[in-house]
Amino acid sequence: MACASGGAAFRNAFFAIASGQADSALVSGVEKMCNVPSPEAMRNLCLVEDLTWESFHGMVPPSGFALIASRYMHEYGVTQEQLAKIAVKNHKNGSQNP
C-alpha cells in the first residue's frame, strides 16, 4: 500500500499476469523518501492507489493503515496504548540501527 515503487511494481505484475501478458512475475521495490517533502511524498504514494475509488474517497495510505489498525483492535481487543508500544519499540530499534 505505502511502498510506492514496490506497490507499483506489484500492481503492474498483477495486471500483466491477469491480462495474460505474463505467466509469472518477479517483483522488487525500494524507496527512500526521507529527502522528499511530505506533500510530494504523499502525491507519489497516491499514484499507486486506485484513483477511481481509494484516492477519490480519501483512502490515502495513512487512512488505510488507520482502518487496518482499527479493525485489528476491534477483532483482538488490542488498545491504542498497546499498539503505541510497538511503534515506540520499532523507533528505538531503528535509531540504534542506522
Image: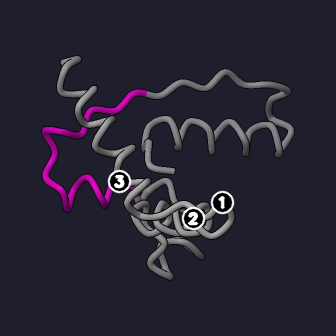
In the rendered image, the vertical position of residue 56 relative to residue 96, given as above or below? below
Q: Relative to residue 64, is residue 41 depicted above or below? A: above
Q: Quadrant of residue 73?
A: bottom right
- The foreground one among 85 and 12 is 85
Are dots 1 and 2 in contact, CB under 8 Å? yes
**Residue on which the image places disc 2:** 73
The part of the image, by quadrant, that contains residue 38 is: bottom left
Determine which residue is flagged by label 1: 76
User: What residue is rendered at 34% in x and 32% in y?
Assistant: 31
Whether residue 44 is in magenta: the answer is yes
Q: Indicate the amino acid at tag 3.
A: Ala
| Crowdedness near tag 1: few (<14), some (14–19) or many (≥20) residues, C-alpha within 10 Å | few
- Indicate the position of residue 7 as horizontal and vertical percent values: 53, 42
Instruction: Report the amino acid beneath label 1.
Output: Tyr
Sequence-earlier tag: 3 or 2: 2
Q: Which residues are magenta?
A: 30-45
| Residue at far top of view | 97
Asked if residue 37 is among those painted magenta in the image, a careful observer would answer: yes
Indicate the position of residue 8 as horizontal and vertical percent values. Answer: 52, 43
Look at 80% across and 35% down and name the residue there.
21
SS label for mark 2: helix
Q: Earlier in the sequence, mark 3 or mark 1?
A: 1
